[in-house]
Image (spheres, rainbow, N blue to C red):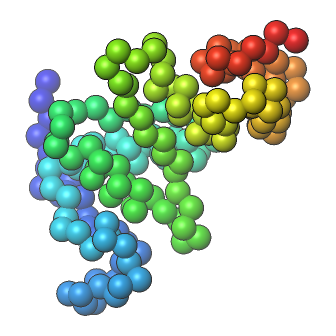
Amino acid sequence: MAVRPDVTDRVRYPAPSVPQDSLFPSSRFSATERRAALAGRAIEMRELERAYAAVRDKKQARTVTVVGAAGIGKTRLVRDFLVRSRDPGGAGPRVYRGAARDGGPAYEVFARILRARFGTLEGMDAEAAKAQVRAQLAAVLEDRKVGDVAYFVGQLLELSFQD
């Protein structure tokens, strides 16, 4: 079923935090904030906003995957969403970006995202990497769950949490 966007569903741009009293915004704004309006992506923008609102309201992590052909505007959509989603203190959603490599190992994109999240590097001493992962898991999970989650995450990161 196709959904026709209503004229009133257009994404308002620039973001509300950008003053609209000048044709030439101050240089304190990034290039993303000075771009032309994003057109034809109101439905996708609303989906991102709904997902982010659910995360804020329920205090639960959520994964959103943006998929499309090269050049269709995926990066622009996400960048504009991030500009719109910042709070006055500059905080916004955490975004991890990845792409699967042809012929790469299964789940490699998830391993790279997890390494970025936990601050571990490929080739890092295994014991140091395990300690870092375990400490960060303990900071967000109840004690009884750390071992189970560490075991699962370790499978993706090729770290053995057998203890």
**Quarter in which the N terminus is drawn:** top left
**Quarter in which the C terminus is drawn:** top right
Q: In the image, residue 52 lies at what x, y percent? A: 48, 45
Which sits in the foreground, 56 or 137?
A: 137
Picture residue at 48% right of the left edge, 32% below the top: 63
Is the residue 26 above or below the residue 102 in the image?
below
| Number of numbered tags placed on the structure image | 0
Picture residue at 37% right of the left edge, 73% below the top: 30
Is the residue 101 above or below the residue 105 in the image?
below
> Is residue 33 something one can see in this rendering?
yes
Image position of 26 (left or right of 72): right
Picture residue at 57% right of the left edge, 47% below the top: 56
Which sits in the foreground, 127 or 154?
A: 127
Q: In the image, residue 127 lies at what x, y percent? A: 81, 26
Q: In the image, residue 78 lies at what x, y percent? A: 35, 49
Is the residue 149 above or below the residue 85 in the image?
above
Is the residue 67 above or below the residue 41 in the image?
above
Q: In the image, residue 76 lies at what x, y percent? A: 27, 53
Image position of 95 (left or right of 45): right
Picture residue at 66% right of the left edge, 41% below the top: 119
